[in-house]
């Protein structure tokens, strides 16, 4: 079961999209200096399919759904991704921010944006050019490309 603590519209996490970012709890990673350590606990409300649909309906105009974390139930995540594809097809982009260095083949096949890598204090977050984290976008005819540098602010 995936649970979420909150959801909000964001503009910086995914370039050129109006993104509904959903904070998923039960994070399996253990980054030192984690910005949201409470997300390591199994807290929040279940993210059922109809819960997700309600969140999108309450936030009209979103073009992307971003899972901020993957929790510990990959089958549930796959189910939600399939639901999004079924309901909105290619009109709704799907992203994942993970602390892992890679994701499963299913996710590479079915997502549009992926941020990989744990937070490591000495390398900094995605907006530092020293970051270890990587951001990938899938382009319609060219496939996946790493575009991390669009986030760098220094
Ligand atoms: S992946 Fe994110 S939420 Fe999870 S431990 Fe790392 S920084 Fe914290």
Image: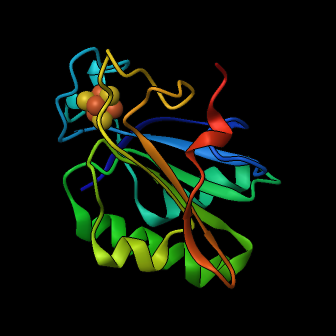
Residue 46 vertical placement versus 26 (above, below): below
Residue 121 vertical placement versus 68 (above, below): above
Question: At 56% from the left edge and 45% from the top edge, which residue is drawn?
Answer: 148
Residue 97 vertical placement versus 143 (above, below): above
Q: Indicate which quadrant contains ligand 1.
A: top left
Assign the C terminus to one quadrant of the image. top right
Nearer to us in this view, 62 or 118: 118
Residue 58 vertical placement versus 73 (above, below): above
Nearer to us in this view, 143 or 70: 143
Question: At 62% from the left edge and 30% from the top edge, which residue is drawn?
Answer: 152
Q: Quadrant of residue 40?
A: top left
Question: At 17% from the left edge and 41% from the top edge, which residue is drawn?
Answer: 28
Q: Left of 79 or right of it: where is 51?
A: right
Assign the N terminus to one quadrant of the image. bottom left
Place of residue 123 in the rendered image (x, y in percent of width and height, measured from the top left): 37, 22
Q: How many marks?
A: 0
Nearer to us in this view, 18 or 126: 126
Place of residue 70 in the rendered image (x, y in percent of width and height, measured from the top left): 32, 51
Place of residue 106 in the rendered image (x, y in percent of width and height, measured from the top left): 34, 78
Q: Left of 18 or right of it: where is 151?
A: left
Place of residue 29 in the rendered image (x, y in percent of width and height, measured from the top left): 19, 37
Question: At 44% from the left edge and 80% from the top edge, which residue is drawn?
Answer: 109
Nearer to us in this view, 154 or 40: 154
């Amino acid at each position: 079961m995936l649970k979420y603590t909150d959801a909000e519209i964001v503009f910086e996490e995914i370039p050129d999209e109006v993104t509904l970012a959903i904070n998923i709890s039960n994070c399996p990673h253990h980054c030192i200096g984690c910005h949201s350590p409470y997300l390591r606990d199994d807290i929040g409300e279940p993210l059922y399919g109809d819960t997700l649909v309600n969140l999108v309906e309450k936030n009209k105009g979103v073009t992307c759904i971003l899972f901020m974390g993957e929790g510990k139930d990959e089958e549930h995540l796959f189910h939600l991704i399939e639901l999004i594809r079924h309901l909105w097809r290619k009109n709704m982009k799907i992203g994942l921010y993970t602390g892992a260095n890679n994701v499963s083949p299913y996710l590479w096949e079915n997502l549009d944006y992926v941020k990989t890598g744990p937070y490591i204090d000495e390398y900094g977050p995605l907006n530092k050019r020293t970051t270890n984290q990587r951001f990938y976008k899938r382009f319609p005819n060219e496939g996946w490309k790493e575009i991390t540098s669009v986030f760098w602010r220094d």
